Amino acid sequence: MRTVAIDAMGGDFGSLPIVDGTVHALKKSKHKFRVIMVGDSSVFAHRIPKRLMKYVEFLECDDVFGMEESATDVLKRKESTIYKAIELVKNNQADAVVSAGHSGATMSLATLRLGRVPGVLRPAIATMMPTETGSRSLILDAGANTDCKADNLLQFAIMGEAYQKEVLQVDKIRVGLLANGEEDSKGNELTKEAFGLLKQLPSFIGNVEGGDIFNGSCDVIVCDGFTGNIVLKASEGVASSISKLIKQNIRKSPTALTGALLMRRVFKLLKKQMDYAEYGGAPLIGVNGCTIICHGKSNPKAIKNAIFQALTFVDSNVNQDIQNKIEQYQK
């Protein structure tokens, strides 16, 4: 039976959504699994139904690494919930860790304590984005590495392709390099050098633009973490603003209100597709073991889906595939 370590107190809203999401996952999963909840159980244990307690273990800890703290300090906080949760994976007491806590601290600890997949230079955060076709594109790096070299971008492509294939079960994968134009000559010095390396991948389709993230023409979009994080935050901002603009204009026009009522189901489906809770969290790809980083404001649904994502990752062959591909293309 698989075991997932849960940082039970790391999110913006404390333990409530994390514990409730874990309970939902235990109830809804087709395959039984165990969880080790790291935190002060006196705060949240009462929210777990007695019939599920046989799948739950507590690791007592009341030190929470705050969102305002510097990620570099987390190595000194060996009694913190995130440190103890990752140590469970390192010591083979858990197969994966899920955290909605400090993302920088989680990345640092996972990389340093779990180590990297052999051959990986730098792990990357992979974020799933909705597309017009209903599929999900994967953008990486989405924030783990602000400064990158061309070799890093080649490895991000390899890691993204492996994740799409092994975890998301996509057969024919198209990898694109994010640039300011589709022409081979476009881009900065980094992307131009990376383009030359990526050409050796059969799945590489060339440069892609920002719109290609959402139109379904590309499955893996590669960029440095600085660019990727800006793309991610901008996308979240646009989705939120569009929703607010629609509501504002509906209030101003009776005709628009009638149309909105007729389009209610469409709006509901669109909102669901854009909701990060549908995807759960972002995997830190390239580390030994499985680390899922959730949004700090994750609701129970997001935590539930993050746990399911972790279980799928653990049952896949993604890390071995990454190691094999890196050996193949970086001799």
Image (cartoon, grey):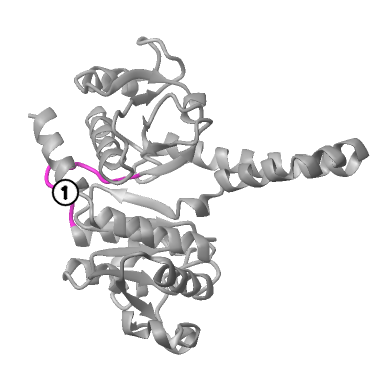
Residue 322 in the image: state x and y as whole percent: 18, 41
Residue at 57% in and 44% down: 274
The segment highlighted magenta reads 115-125
Residue at 20% in and 60% down: 114
The residue type indicated by label 1 comes to Val
Query: Front-most of 151 and 301?
Result: 301
Quarter of the rendering occupied by the N terminus: bottom left
Residue 135 in the image: state x and y as whole percent: 45, 36
Compared to residue 257, the image places residue 107 above or below, namely below
Q: Secondary structure at mark 1?
A: loop
Compared to residue 314, the image places residue 171 above or below, namely above
Quarter of the rendering occupied by the C terminus: top left
Question: According to the image, label 1 marks what residue?
Answer: 117
Q: How busy is the neighbourhood of tag 1: few (under 14 within 10 Å), some, or many (20 plus)?
A: many
Residue at 36% in and 9% down: 185
Could you tell whether 295 is left or right of 225 in the image? Answer: right
